Image (cartoon, grey):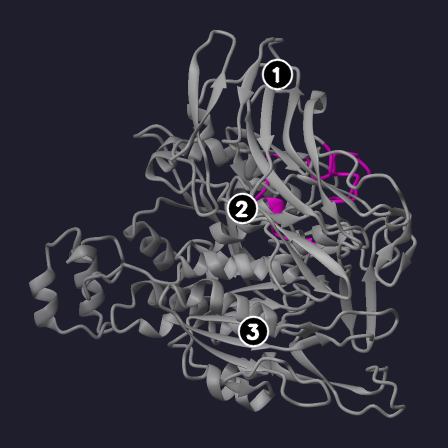
Amino acid sequence: MKKAFCIISLHVIVFFSLITTNGAFSKSFRDYPSLNSKIIVTLTAPRYEIIETGEGNHVIRTPGSGYLMDPGNPKLPEIVKILPLPQNAIDTSLNVKVVDERSKFLKELDNIEPSPPLLLSSGSMHLVNWGKSKEIKNGKNLLVYGSSAGYPEKCIRILGIQNRKQTKYLRLAFYPFRWHPKTGELEIITEVKCVISFNEVNGNVGTSSLGTGTRSSSSPLISSSKEDTLKDSPAAGSDAHDYVIITSNAVVINSQKLSQFKFFKEAIGHSVLIVTEDQYQSLNGPPPNGRAEKIRQWLIDNYKELGIKYVLLIGDPDPSNGDVPMKMCWPRSHESNYKVTPTDYYYADLTGNWDIDGDGLYGEYPDDNKPGGVDYAAEVWVGRIPVYNNDYETLDRILEKIMDYETESQNTSWRKHVLLPAAILNFDQEPPSDLTRTDGAELAQKIIQDYLNDEGFSSYSLYERQGLQPSEYLPDSPLNHTNVIDEWVKGYGIVCAVGHGSETGIYRKYWNIDEDNDNVADSGETVFASYFKANDAEALDDNHPSIVYLCACNNGYPENSGNLGYSLLKHGAVATLSASRVSWYTAGWTEPNPNYADNMSLGYYYIKKVSQNLPCGEALAEVKEELVYNSSSIWINLQGFNLYGDPEMTLINTHSFCSGDFDYDDDVDGQDLARLASGGESVSVEDFSNQFGKSGCKNN
């Protein structure tokens, strides 16, 4: 593995591992000595290729990197580097200065493809987000494309600072190409040296040097190594609880399965703590100091000391009056519409101040996108089981399903089957502006080709085949309501569904007729039809439940007890990831961007991590931490996609238990004998006798 040098003022050399796309930190950041108040970073241009994309446009590809996504402006490579900072660095003091830049003329290009806008579709209406202060014509910002100035002006930019537990790091963007639109001149930045300076609380002064061994943003930001797990936990013998269930007294009293679920989690190696309003109600959180703020305050006060890793919220998620509410946030507070989204990520990012400007509107962009504000780096991994209308029986069925799923020891090969229903989201030239066709089949195809096939998964695709412009890809079956249900009931480990969404359904769209013969899918010429609704979940096989990603709007709407995400969790799924409000997609999406959380890129990376057997809560946290971007609509995606289900859930489990260990305490003893004697258990007396007195039986 390549090495880069970090030289501090005492001339001690510390090696930083060069992290590749699929790499991970060999050591936690906290294992390195604190850097001093200046970091010198040297970056060099990557390998690249220039591709003509049609109509005289070009795009520059660099392996493993994303793009500078500023809608309407030239789409140029953006390489995000992650630099460790000392924990006592003062965020507001951070500054970057380029001290040496070396570039050369590469060639002339008449046109570089513009970055596409973010889109929101509702019925026949499309809301196009180009950003502010632009003059857009034919998809291009004339203020840039008509300029002789180089774009981007600066090749280095600070994107933000992220804090996670005892780790602080800087997100630094490097733009290795600069294009001059009027002349067509394309420069390549062959090498750039910059100085990142900051003040520390103790006033240390010194200099460090980093080469290209800084970490790429496409690598995991969260290490899962045993070494890191041990270091994040309290000292041996202390009152450690890595798994916390936050719920209400009513749930504790009325659930018949919660105590068994606790025993189960402890049997597979966790230390579980159940927390109710008795523990957090007396705390003082920030204004308005409601349940959400008090719950988060309890987590802030305890996550380090207890070594909390997983948080399962059980209760009514309604942000207005739920007993374990989501937090209502305002990522688009300065826009004219779609301003809010409820989120559980408020309980995951515990070091950021979600209302740093103090105006009572949490999670605003850009107001709370400041040093010390929201940074999307999770301290804990969060999931939720909603409980509506005191329906404790449904809660118990979900808890039992999770336990059954994690202890299934028979044939689990079905879990490596992936169902991919994907709708067309918009057509070329649709009003109100010239839109580029967006087919959800592009996401499905990338998932299949980029990692499912290599990892031994099988897939079944359903794409749009009806209307004037069906999908260009041939699916296993056409996308419609009957075909989706008929296939899903066969049992799939993962389902990634793309479409238009409502609170209770996901929809396809096809171009039915061109009445005015203008070759444009005008309003009234397209048809929306559901291909799966909340009540369809009852038809699914709950003995073979899926991990589901719903790439659509509103499917996880927490105020509606019939929302699609929860309906699937009740029947047909063991975990769902869905949007609590609208979600935005990139027009003409054809590939994922590792620096940009449009809803299809988010789904691409989430499904990839789940297929690699990362726990659902951890997979979601990593994706949000890696794909954070400075945009109000991206922020609504980052906040709005919430996990319904156990955050520790993995696709493939390795747990098996003795059939006589009824209370999941990892031994077969007198308590289990009493359960057997009551007649409520189906195991044979002979099998029980063979296991009685054994401990560690989960491995037998």
Q: Alpha carbon of mark 2 to alpha carbon of mark 1: how far?
A: 25 Å
Depth check: 410 or 508 in front?
Answer: 508
Foreground mark, 3 or 2, reads 2
* Residue 88 placement: quadrant: top right
Asked whether 364 falls inside the magenta stretch, the response is yes
Q: Alpha carbon of mark 3 to alpha carbon of mark 1: how far?
A: 53 Å
**Residue 469 point in image, percent of width and height:** 71, 85
Q: Which residue is mark 1?
A: 38
**Residue 180 point in image, percent of width and height:** 81, 43
Question: What residue is shown at x 66% (from left), y 69% (from top)?
Answer: 552
Q: Which residue is mark 2?
A: 218
Image-based side of 615 in relation to 630, left or right: left
Q: Secondary structure at mark 2?
A: loop
The quarter in which the C terminus is drawn is bottom left
Q: Secondary structure at mark 1?
A: strand
**Magenta span of residues:** 342-370
Q: Which residue is mark 3?
A: 567
**Residue 445 point in image, percent of width and height:** 54, 71
Q: Secondary structure at mark 3?
A: helix
**Is residue 518 placed above or below 99 in the rendered structure?**
below
The tally of labels here is 3
Question: What residue is shown at x 60% (from left), y 64% (from top)?
Answer: 578
- Magenta segment's dominant SS is loop
Q: Alpha carbon of mark 3 to alpha carbon of mark 2: how far?
A: 33 Å
